[in-house]
Image: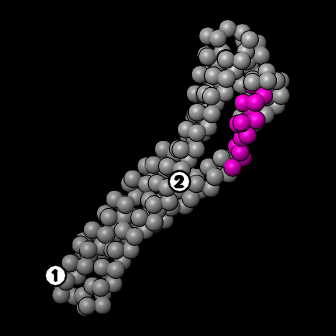
Amino acid sequence: MLWITVIEWLARLIFIILIGLSVWSISIIIERRRFFKSLAIPFEEYKKLVRSKKNEDLQTRPLVGELFTELKSVRSTEQIEKVFDAYVVTKKSELEKGLPVLGTLGSTTPFIGLLGTVLGIIVSFGELSQGTGNTNSVMFSLAEALILTAVGLVVAIPAVISFNFFSRKSRFLLNEITAIKDLYIAYKD
């Protein structure tokens, strides 16, 4: 029947969509890994420079250089807080780039795979109900259906792990910047 063929092709379309989502997820993971690897920041060294009031040295450092360049014209604690807060908001969006996509892929791709599995099982039952399918074709369509669930999980698992890892790394960097702010305010005079 025609509806079995349509459902069978829908299941295959879902497989192609899952492969595309997998490529998207992997490209985000690779880009975020490179980005965070480039931010291997010696925060303890930064904190020592703040304590010793060598803020000029911090102006050339990665991640905080532009911040300390802007801070050299600011004197009051309130202004310093505002500059740091604005900087953290800017950096937060940079640090969390792509993470919502990873979170969404991690939570939805198993369901997309499950939808493909349900469609594949419908095809198997359709073949059985018509009496046209032999045991091998029914088993093949069931296996094809289960592969879709597996592919959904294969896409989701790395996405969730990467989302959690990069979110934790982002929070760590933001906490370190906040610690530098507190030290800067404490040692500014």
**In terms of image quadrants, where is residue 3?**
bottom left
Q: Is residue 139 magenta?
A: no
Q: Which quarter of the image is occupied by the C terminus? A: top right
Please provide percent x and percent y for residue 106.
43, 54
Q: Residue at x 78, y 28 (%)?
A: 49
Q: Is residue 23 above or below residue 136?
A: above
Quick check: 143 above or below 118?
A: below
The answer to whether residue 30 is left or right of residue 53 is: left
Q: Taking the image as drawn, is residue 7 in sight?
A: no
**Residue under label 1:** 129
Residue 85 in picture, x, y percent from top left: 59, 22
Please state the extent of the stretch shown in magenta in the rendering: 37-50
Say what amino acid the circle numbered 2 marks.
Ser
Of 102 and 78, which appears nearest the observer? 78
Which of the labelled discs sits on residue 162, or is there none?
A: 2
Q: How many marks?
A: 2
Q: Secondary structure at mark 2?
A: helix
Q: Separation of disc 1 and disc 2 at Cα? A: 44 Å
